[in-house]
Image (spheres, rainbow, N blue to C red):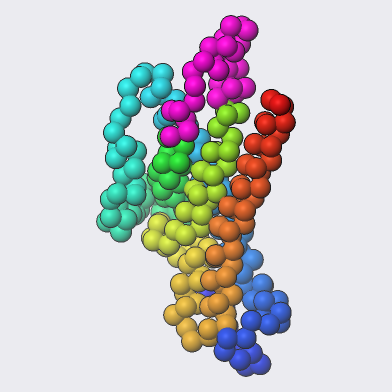
Amino acid sequence: LGWHNHSSIMTGDLSVTLWQEEWFFMQTPLFNSLNIAFVSAMLGLGTSLLALELQRQSRRYLPDYVWLMAILLPQLSMVYGWQVMHTGITGSYHSAWIIVSHLPFTFAYSYLVLRGPFQSINRHYELVAASFAYTYWQRWWRVRFMLLRPALLSAFALAFSVSIAQYIPTLMIGAGRVTTITTEAVAVASGNQQGITAVYILVQALLPFIAFLVATVLAQRLRGSFDAQHH
């Protein structure tokens, strides 16, 4: 479970010693959480951009609830179906399957954040780029993508945080063999050592905070550099 009895540490003690001793048990769950969250957030971001671009090209936009099924449907029932399917396909349990189980959620939240900014980009920017003989992909990368960078950072931070918080998919698809900060926090919380529980909860809360902080700082720098270039 990533924790053990500390006779020398009183309940609720959050001293440096407690953090140092608990770090040995926290390294693997922390690495798994960062790895799974980063990859699933990037995949969710990429697939949501692909879905938006395909709809823009076809000029046919599906209702939002089609893309947001992972948010709207009961998670336990949905993940149980995935577990049955996963067991039938393969008996292996590793991080790749956890990433796949997180993808519907990271996709849904990324789509929710990106839909408005993506559709509100003025087409005239791309028409001007086309007049300079830019190809389709050059226009997409140098115009649309550049204008979307602040929204992409926000979407990534949200998708990353959503992946960090996933408990049911991680536990059921991984069968408890792939530990993350969230699964360990729940496991530790069932014990009676409040100090160790607090450590895991603080780390779990700190990861999304750092993601949003970095996204905010980078977005502000991007806006600042954009304003400086156009004044």
Residue at x 58% of width, y 6% of height: 131
Q: Quadrant of the C terminus?
A: top right
Q: Residue furthest front?
A: 231
Q: Is residue 169 above or below residue 112?
A: below
Q: Residue 68, percent across and down?
A: 34, 43
Q: Residue 184, percent across and down?
A: 51, 70
Q: Is residue 78 left or right of residue 200?
A: left
In this view of the protein, which residue sits in the foreground, 184 or 60?
A: 60
Residue at x 59% of width, y 13% of height: 129
Q: Residue 27, percent across and down?
A: 64, 66
The number of discs equals 0
Q: Specify start and end residues of the magenta stretch as a single range.
A: 116-144
Query: Would you say residue 47 is visible in this rendering?
Result: no
Query: Would you say residue 45 is visible in this rendering?
Result: yes
Q: Residue 42, percent across and down?
A: 54, 41
Residue at x 68% of width, y 31% of height: 227
Residue 130 on the magenta segment: yes
What predominant SS class does the magenta segment belong to?
helix
Q: Is residue 225 above or below residue 83?
A: above
Residue at x 68% of width, y 82% of height: 15
Residue 153 on the magenta segment: no
